Image (spheres, rainbow, N blue to C red):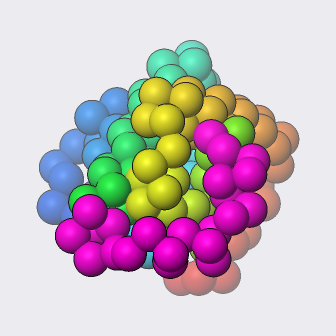
Amino acid sequence: MIESAVSSLLSYLAIPQIGLTAVFIITCVSATLLPMGSEPAVFAVISADRSMFWPVIFVATAGNTLGGVINYWIGYGTRQTFAKERETRWFGWLLRYGPKMMLLTWLPVIGDPLSTLAGWLRLPFWQCVIYQAIGKFLRYVTMTSLLLLIPVEYWLTIADFLG
């Protein structure tokens, strides 16, 4: 069930095999401004082989952090091309709290734009990367651990229901 769902996702993305490379690509793309979730792929690989828990978590964190870095540079370049200094007043809260706000880049909907705004505002790059990595790591550990607590029978029931 999980393998077929991931296989469909990878086929859709034209990624041939499931594994750490696929997890890296999926998590990187999902952290950009493209609307896509990475948790199903991370959970599927770990469900297939629980001994891969930590390698998958670290690869997912690296991929997702790289996607956040891409967003940072998109924001940085966009501001350099289009913005005026007075426009930063709308994002004073981000300037006030600084790179620590990157801990929240794991949040759905606001996380990806938050890393883009960090680049726009030219917050310190490496501090932003470190805080993003910490937040994303904690998300993957928490989400995957919680999903692993759900019995396999539940997932099979969902798969049967969905056809």
Residue 71 in which image quadrant = bottom left
Q: Residue at x 44, y 35 (%)?
A: 125
Q: Position of residue 68 (x, y in %)?
A: 44, 49
Q: Which residues are magenta?
A: 78-99
Q: Residue at x 16, y 49 (%)?
A: 16
Quick check: can you spot residue 88?
yes
In this rendering, would 78 be left or right of 109? left
Q: Main secondary structure of the magenta part?
A: helix
Q: Position of residue 73 (x, y in %)?
A: 31, 51
- Tell me: residue 81, above or below residue 17: below
In this rendering, would 139 be left or right of 128? right
Indicate yes or no whether the magenta region holds residue 85: yes
Q: Farthest front residue?
A: 86
Indicate yes or no whether the magenta region holds residue 95: yes
Q: Position of residue 77 (x, y in %)?
A: 25, 60
Q: Residue at x 74, y 51 (%)?
A: 96
23 or 28: nearer the eye?
28
Q: Position of residue 135 (x, y in %)?
A: 67, 38
Residue 162 in which image quadrant = bottom right
6 or 125: nearer the eye?
125
Q: Residue at x 63, y 77 (%)?
A: 90
Number of dots carrying numbers: 0
- Tell me: residue 92, above or below residue 97: below
Quick check: can you spot residue 12?
no
In this rendering, would 95 be left or right of 38? right
77 or 115: nearer the eye?
77
